Amino acid sequence: MAVSTILLILVILLLIGAVPAWPHSRSWGYGPSGILGVILLILIILLLMGRL
């Protein structure tokens, strides 16, 4: 598997997990979406630099 495929699957799973639709995750606040934002920012920077 290519690294980009693994990263794409990881980002999709994080997007699903960041949605506060389940009762146990409603109290988490902005934590999951903040982590997802940092990961997406790092991926965009790596793509722009041509390292990914």
Image (cartoon, rainbow, N blue to C red):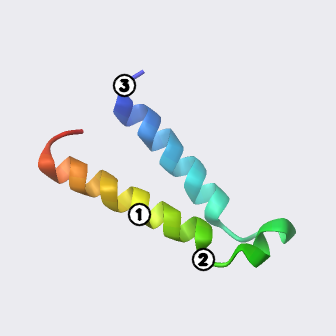
Find out whether the residues at labels 2 and 1 contact each other: C-beta distance under 8 Å. Answer: no
Q: Quadrant of the N terminus?
A: top left
Amino acid under label 2?
Tyr
Q: Is residue 2 left or right of residue 26?
A: left
Q: Quadrant of the C terminus?
A: top left
Residue 8, given in percent of the width and then of the height, sits at 44, 42
Residue, x 86% and y 70% (percent of image)? 23
Amino acid under label 3?
Ala
Residue, x 23% and y 56% (percent of image)? 45
- Judge depth for marks 3 and 1 and give the one in front: 1
Above or below — where is 37 with respect to 48?
below
* Of pointers 3 and 1, the one earlier in the residue sequence: 3
Q: Quadrant of residue 28?
A: bottom right
Residue carrying label 1: 38
Above or below — where is 22 with respect to 46?
below
Above or below — where is 9 with respect to 3?
below
Give the Cα distance between marks 3 and 2.
Answer: 30 Å
Secondary element type, mark 1: helix
* Of pointers 2 and 1, the one earlier in the residue sequence: 2
Secondary element type, mark 2: loop
Q: For label 3, count other residues whose C-alpha is less than 10 Å away and answer few (under 14), some (14-19) or many (20+).
A: few
Residue 41, given in percent of the width and then of the height, sits at 33, 62
Residue carrying label 3: 2
Give the Cα distance between marks 3 and 1.
Answer: 22 Å
Q: Residue lying furthest top in this view?
A: 1
Q: Residue lying furthest right in this view?
A: 23
Residue, x 52% and y 43% (percent of image)? 10
Amino acid under label 1?
Val
Residue, x 67% and y 78% (percent of image)? 29
Residue 18, given in percent of the width and then of the height, sits at 62, 64
Give the Cα distance between marks 2 and 1.
Answer: 12 Å
Residue carrying label 2: 30
